[in-house]
Amino acid sequence: MENAPVLYHPVTIGTLVLPGNIFLAPVAGYSDKSFRSICVDWGADFTYTEMVSSEAYVRSSAKTETLITRAHNEKRYAVQIFGANPEYMAETAIRILEKYEPQCIDINAGCPMPKITKTGAGSALMRNPEKLYSVVHAVTEAIAARGAAVPVTVKIRSGWSHNELTWKDSALAAVEAGASAITLHPRTCAQCYSGTSDWDILAQLAALMEGRIPVFGSGDLFTPESARNMLMSTGCAGVMFARGAMGNPFIFRQTKELLRTGSYKEISAADKIKTARKELEQLCKEVGEEKACRDMRKRFAAYTKGIDGGAKLREQLVRASSVKDYEIILQAV
C-alpha cells in the first residue's frame, strides 16, 4: 500500500489554507452557531453557516443576522449566501465580510426547495450558467475591489433534472467568474434528496478541475466509511457532511480517525447525551430557553438513535419544553 493516496490532508482554497478536508456543509435550519460549535469540538476542519438570503440581508433582517454570527471556537468559517440579483449578492458579501470577517463566502447554486428556486436562486441558477457567472463575478469583483483576500466558493448540484445536467457548464462558469472552489452534490434539483447521488459525476468534475481549483463532494455521506469511499472513488479534495452530521457530530472525529489509522472508536451513550446537553445549553444562550428546547426535540431524537432505550426516550423528548424537562427525562441515561 506504499502508493495509497493520503486521504486526510490540508486543503488550499484561494488564499485560505485549511488543516484538513472534512467539513460541515451548510444545512438549512440546522447548522446554526450552536451546532457548528459542537461540530468543531468533534473535529470539523471547516464549517459553513446555513444559507443567508441576500434579499433579506439587504433589508437588514434581524433574523438573518443571527444565522451569521461566528461560534466562539470557530477559528475559520464560511458564510453561505443565496440570491439571483448580482448587486444584492455583492452588497451582502461585502457587508458580511466587514461585520463578521468570515474566511470564505460561499454561493448557493444548489438548493432545490421551490421557495428558493422560484426566485431564480439556488438550483435555478444552474438552468442559466450565464446568470450564475454574473452572480459569482459580481461577488468576486466586489471583494477584490475592497482589497480583501477572501475566496469565493460555489455549491452546485448536477443539474435541474436528468434532462438538464448542467454541472459542467455551471462549474466552468463559476470558475471563470472567479470561484476558488466548487462543492458538488451530485443529485438534480428534481431529485431533491431522493434516490442516490451520482458519484461518477463528482469524479468527472474533480478530473476536469484538477490543477485548477479543489472540488469537494457532498451527498449520501452518513458514515466514516462513506466519506472514505467518496474520497477514494472520486478523487475529490474533501467531503462535506450534511444530513450525516445531524445528531452525529462525532462523524468528523471518527472519519479523521478512519482516514489516518484505518479504524475508529465508537461513541458511548454517555458522550452522546453529554454532547446533546452541551448543544442545548449553547442554543439556550443563543435563542432563549423556550425556542431552544423546542428546536432541540428533533436534535435529541437524532442523538439518541442507537442508544439502548432510545425509542422510549424519544417518546418523552418530543414533549420537552424546558431545560428541567430534559434533565428529568435524561437523568436515568
Image (cartoon, helix red, strand yellow):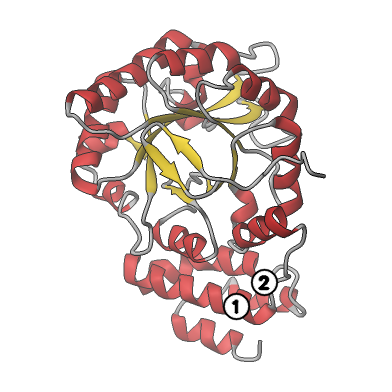
Give the mark count.
2
Q: Position of residue 144 (x, y in %)?
A: 23, 25
93 sits to left or right of 180: left
The one of 308 and 266 positioned closer to us in this rendering:
266
Give the residue furthest to the top. Answer: 130
Give the residue furthest to the right. Answer: 1
SS at badge 1: helix
Residue at mark 1: 273
- Tell me the kind of residue under disc 1: Ile
The one of 300 and 118 positioned closer to us in this rendering:
300
Residue at mark 2: 304
The one of 128 and 175 positioned closer to us in this rendering:
175
Residue located 56% across and 74% down the image = 319
The mark nearer the N terminus, 1 or 2, is 1
Residue located 38% across and 58% down the image = 74
Quarter of the image where the C terminus is located: bottom right
Q: Position of residue 315 (x, y in %)?
A: 67, 74
- Tell me the kind of residue under disc 2: Thr
155 sits to left or right of 1: left
The one of 231 and 91 positioned closer to us in this rendering:
231
Residue 198 shows in the view:
no
Q: Report which quarter residue 71 is drawn in.
A: bottom left
SS at badge 2: loop
Q: Position of residue 36 (x, y in %)?
A: 45, 57
Q: Is residue 35 above or below residue 148?
A: below
Quarter of the image where the N terminus is located: top right
* Circle number at residue 29: none
* Residues marked 1 and 2 touching at CB (< 8 Å): yes
- C-alpha span from label 1 to label 2: 8 Å
Residue located 70% across and 42% down the image = 220
